Image (cartoon, rainbow, N blue to C red):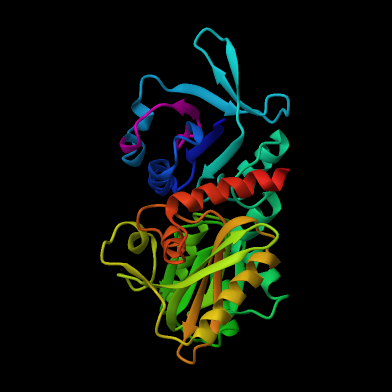
Amino acid sequence: MKKKLLILFGGASSEHEVSCLSAASVLRHLDENKYEIYKVGITKEGNWFLTDSPVSDIEEGRWTEKPGNRRASLSPDTFVRGMILYGDNGVCEMRNVDVVFPVLHGKYGEDGTVQGLLELAGIPFVGAGTTSSAACMDKAITKHIIESTYVKQADYYLTDRFSFASDPQGILKEIEEHFQGSYPLFVKPANAGSSVGISKAKNGLELFNAIRVAAEEDHKVLIEKAISGREIEVAVLGNRHPRASLVGEILAANEFYDYDAKYINTESKTRILDDVSEEKQEEIRQAALTVYQAMGCRGLARVDFFLDEEETVIFNEINTLPGFTKISMCPKLWEATELPYRELLDTLIALAVDEME
């Protein structure tokens, strides 16, 4: 019997378009002989619709224009264990779901909000649980947790939108004292993905502007010492006994791997890291597993590091719902580790069901 699989995509976040690209790629690779697929899109305004739009319309953002879209929601009631569909005449219909794949990025998608709803509903879902999703989404909380492990990370300073607005010069002075006047610095919103709101500051004026940009995305702002080195990534898969993929490297087209370099600029490249020793690659994989388990992850994640000039492994961040577009690193890493995209999806769905049993 086919599993009833709900693909949740879009979302009321700045990463709406990336989510649609990821969902389109996932839908193209799913085995329709195994799954009865429901496509539920969330508009930028936060409205939910069951849609039968073709994958190309989802990819290009035209799915919202489909006349047959039907208003839908996920019920937190375990009796329903699925969707409620709303008719024009006020009549509602319940539709049972076996498993949900939230192909969502950023706020209201991978930050524990949707995960909490699914846990209340008792529906198995792909990816980390509520607490882990929220902790991994918040870069400041992640920093605090990783400090309890052996894994190295960049020096950082945390501020917030309100403190900066009330005393910008005082905060700038504290930051410069913390980093002893050293630049460049990376400025990031604590809660955002796909490098949205991230800037590289090379002086005080750029730092001031970067904090303002980051504060538009989240009230907490993280300032980090810039690490000179290679950007590397590892995909992790599993629940109680996770495994790590081969190590990949990002060759960013821009000065750093920002939103444009990830999703728009075709000059960005990715490759399997093959010019460092096997011992160093194993060290990187073990660090990825340590971070994954320290953060309480399950299902999947992508763990990002820097490899500096002395080949020191430095943790950057973790993503519990990494991109699944045709150019995304996570599926590419598993392909290189001899787990093809379609089999990866089957594995993720099986892990979701296993976690709830």
Is residue 133 shown above or below 148?
above
For the question of whether residue 170 can be seen, the reply is: no
From the top left corner, tell me how far across and down residue 19 is, in percent.
Answer: 44, 46
Residue at 68% x, 42% y: name it.
116
From the top left corner, tell me how far across and down residue 75 is, in percent.
Answer: 65, 28
Residue 286, quarter of picture: bottom right
Task: Name, please, the residue furthest toward the top.
Answer: 89
For the question of whether residue 41 can be seen, the reply is: yes
Is residue 122 shown above or below 131?
above
From the top left corner, tell me how far across and down residue 247 is, in percent.
Answer: 47, 73
Q: Is residue 64 left or right of residue 139?
A: left
The quarter of the image holding the N terminus is top right
Is residue 140 shown above or below 274?
above
Q: Give the range drawn in magenta.
A: 40-56
- Count of all numbered marks drawn on residues in the image: 0
164 magenta-colored: no
Looking at this view, is 291 or 236 the one in front?
236
